[in-house]
Amino acid sequence: MLLCDSAQVAEGKLYILGGGWSLTGPDPTPSAIAMKIEVDWSDAERPHHFELFLVDADGQPVMVETPVGLHAVEARADFTVTRPDSVPPGSPIDIPFVIPVGPLPLNPGTRYTWRLVINGETDDSWYLGFSTRAVLED
């Protein structure tokens, strides 16, 4: 996973602009999360599910006000991978994803982490941390 200003998927590749940062703000700014999921050959042709959650430094879900009330900042998706003829049998299958993130009203001078869960499993390497700049006093 990689934090970036923006990204898109085209022809099975990630196209990333302004990628690799870990400091943002303090003003709300649009961004994106670019990620490549490697699906094992044996796990192709069946449904998968991922969930991406934004949590604060205490591990609590980040909540934002929406037109229908307070909601956690999260993304969820189901996907199924087919075995391409061009990939040798037994090879992992790359799946690029981009999650656009609108401007979020995050607290300045705070640490946040995106946590990825795939099929109910997670790993420390599936965490993506970043901080917001403190507001400078005049």
Image: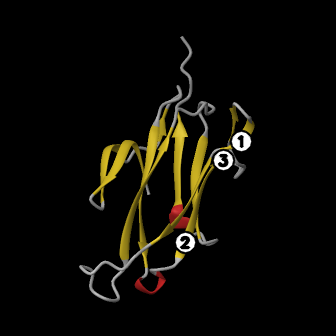
95 left or right, relative to 88 = right
Q: N-terminal of the two: label 2 or label 1?
A: 2
Label for residue 92?
A: none
Q: Secondary structure at mark 2?
A: strand
Q: Residue at x 27, y 86 (%)?
A: 88
Q: Amino acid at mark 3?
A: Ala
Q: Nearer the viewer, mark 1 or mark 3?
A: 1
Q: Callout 3: helix, strand or loop?
A: loop
**Residue 6: percent from the left, percent from the top?**
38, 41
- Relative vertical location of residue 55 with respect to residue 45 in this rendering, above or below: above
For label 1, the SS is strand
Identity, as a three-letter code, of the amino acid under mark 1: His
Q: Which residue is mark 1?
A: 71
**In this rendering, position of residue 115 left or right of residue 5:** right
- Residue drawn at (56%, 15%) of the image: 137
Q: Are marks 1 and 3 in contact (CB under 8 Å)?
A: no
User: In the orientation shown, which residue stands out farthest toward the right?
Assistant: 69
Residue 19 horizontal side relative to residue 37, left or right: left
Q: Which residue is mark 2?
A: 48
In the rendered view, tell whether residue 29 sits above or below residue 118. above
Amino acid found under the numbered disc labelled 2: His
State the mark number for residue 57: 3
